[in-house]
Image: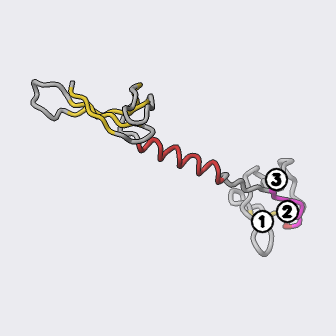
Amino acid sequence: MPTVSHFSCDPQFCTQCGAILPILGTTGGVVCIVCKFEINIEVMEEIRVDYNIDFNKRSDYIEEQQMKSAQSKTDGPLVERKCSKCGNETMSYASLQLRSADEGQTIFYTCTKCQHKETENS
């Protein structure tokens, strides 16, 4: 007695319950995990799977690493301050309390171009 299909669907789905079929094995047909309906292997012959593997560009990776390296060379936030050694207009800074608590803090500036360090007592 032939079985009547309840669904009209792609070969990747069970025609009885609509569940996704498991991956095709090496022998026999495909058995639906949900309703145990067995589908003939010939139905799967027309299925074609295409895929592409897109690799990241090496130049993008190198550029990203250079940006990370440049960012790691800065000691802190950036400020517009002229370097006394090379004349660069951007320096990073960090502040520390090195003297007694009733005195100001010491600010350390680092040039983002030549890595020259300057200090300022505030």
In the image, residue 105 above or below residue 50: above
| Residue labelled with disc 3 | 15
Q: Secondary structure at mark 1?
A: strand
In the image, 28 versus 98, the foreground residue is 98
Using residue 69 as the reference point, say whether residue 102 is left or right of it. left
Identify the residue shown where x is 63% and y is 48%.
Answer: 60
Q: Residue at x 77, y 61 (%)?
A: 37
Q: Amino acid at mark 1?
A: Val
Residue 44 shows which numbered tag? 2
Disc sitting over residue 30 in the figure: 1
Task: Name the residue type under label 2.
Answer: Met
**Residue 105 horizontal/vertical position (percent):** 19, 28
Magenta span = 42-50
Q: Give me the C-alpha separation between circle 1 and circle 2.
A: 9 Å
Q: Are marks 1 and 3 in contact (CB under 8 Å)?
A: no
User: Disc 1 or 2, which lies upstream in sequence?
Assistant: 1
- Looking at the rendered structure, the kind of residue marked 3 is Thr
